[in-house]
Image (cartoon, rainbow, N blue to C red):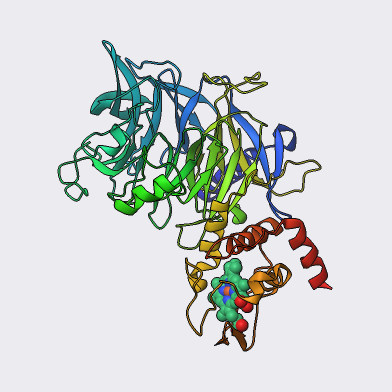
Amino acid sequence: MKKQLYCVLVSCVVLMVSACQHIPREEYIDFLKVSDTTYLGVSQLTDSLEVPWDLQFNPTTKSIFFTEIKGQISELNLATNKRTIIYTVPHVFQKRSMGLLGLALHPDFDKKPYLYVCYTIKDGEHYFSELAKLRYVEGKIVESKVLLKIGGALGHNGSRLLFDKERLLYWATGDAHSNTNSQDSTNLNGKVLRMTDEGLIPSDNPISNSYVYAWGFRNIQGMAMTSKGHLMTSEHGDAIEDEINLVKPLHNYGWKEIEGFHDTDAEKEIARHSSRTEPIKAWTPVIAPAAISYYGSQAIPEWSNSLLLTTLKNQSFRVLKLDAEQQVIADEKVYFKNHYGRIRAVTIDDTGNIYIATSNRDWNPQNGFPQKGDDRILKLAVIDFVPKEFLMAYEPENKKISDGKVLYQSYCASCHKNDGKGVRNSFPPLIQTPTITDAHKLVTVLLKGLKGKNVINGEEYDEEMPAFGFLSDADVATIATYIRTHFGNNLGSIDSAMVKDIRMTTHK
Ligand code: HEC
């Protein structure tokens, strides 16, 4: 009897505690509208940090571990928001983008309580990047071991660390400002390296006895693994072409001979003679992409199966929606533009809450920053009420022709094929048909689909063309323009105002 009463009391206390964790409305600093049915509250968990470079949620401790560029590693308790500095990495050399950078936690943290960090050191006149494994015991780092040391430079030191499901560790390195490192398969800079949790070379690495897993990178600033096990990186281009790459073993991503898509004659020529892999997304003008993280949770259903991307130059948080195979970026949404300043790090907890960190006290602050409280860690969580005022998504600023290619490949190529030639008697070619030449007709087919027997260029087609009315006016215009300017078509472009008009008239 007594025992039962005790249990009731305990569960009351537990209920009260969890009720307390609900943030009262006035503590949100902003609200964000994701859709008519999903709103997020933004709250600030901690402030006055100095360039938090990497955030990693730890499901074992229910806390976030994070690095700051000067060398500190902290643990942020998510129940209390208390931040504790657990270690200062010795010998970190900090200047500009050099310092304590990437962080990974061992996926079996309860049995193997290790943190992995990479950082810059200076040895005489030379810079290096080191990768170290740190042992965590009861809120402290008690042991440290350097696993690997590679060349470094005043910039382009890469940084991200990531474990896959097999417990292999990936280290994304930068080209260390060299003209030759990235294309030299024996050099460890400008690469994605792959190793065991002890820092050894796995026996199944693509080049035997080498850490190199993939090559031809400039300066990787984000790395994530999708639920289907696709390795993704974000990378800084030079003056143009920031990239997202889908990283496959031994693939060469082209730097520094090819930048972004293979779109210049010189680049096409190189790609013809040696195997080079294009990014799955590129941005010109550049946005300076930083951390990426894979969002698989259903907590924010609109964002499920996306890469969450933080950006520096563009000062935004982006949601890059993936297709079902997780190989194509099918949509992009831009949030918080210029609102919190530079955003460098992101992590996701086990219930689908998102945490981001600003980077306004780094060497390159943008107009109006740093502000009081910078740098800070912010939390984005679903709320169960509709706020009076809220922020919303921005349209991505540039829809390049390359995006038309991406859209075409994700929505159309499965039937009409990459070259637009289609499949005879099943899927018509998208080349010089009356529908393609008639802009109005083309947009109508895209919005409404097409059914019944049709003779197209002398061949009969009787399968169904699905409707793509769910795409935005801008996306329909981009795809239509892509078709009319590729595959040997030499027709004018179509703008979203025209799509909007046709959508309105065909709806009546
Ligand atoms: C599931 C397969 C499938 C997909 C995906 C698909 N189509 Fe089609 N499409 C067809 C079929 C089948 C037809 C012919 C329909 C008929 O007349 O019977 C067609 C017809 C068309 C036509 C008319 C061709 C002409 O000359 O009259 C256009 C234009 C077209 N598709 C463009 C697209 C675009 C752009 C996309 C991507 C947004 C796309 N389709 C996606 C199957 C598909």
Residue 81 is drawn in which quadrant? top right
Choose between 245 and 23: the one closer to the eye. 245
- Position of the C terminus, as image quadrant, is bottom right
Is residue 166 positioned above or below 200 on the image? below
Residue 129 is drawn in which quadrant? top left
* Side of 266 relative to 167 (left or right): right
In percent of width and height, residue 65 lies at 44, 31
Choose between 201 and 214: the one closer to the eye. 214
Choose between 379 and 269: the one closer to the eye. 269
Residue 27 is drawn in which quadrant? top right
In percent of width and height, residue 228 lies at 40, 58
Is residue 463 positioned above or below 21 on the image? below
In percent of width and height, residue 145 lies at 24, 26
Query: Could you tell me if residue 216 is visible in this image?
Result: yes
Among all residues in the image, which is located at the extreme top?
Answer: 124
* Side of 69 relative to 455 (left or right): left
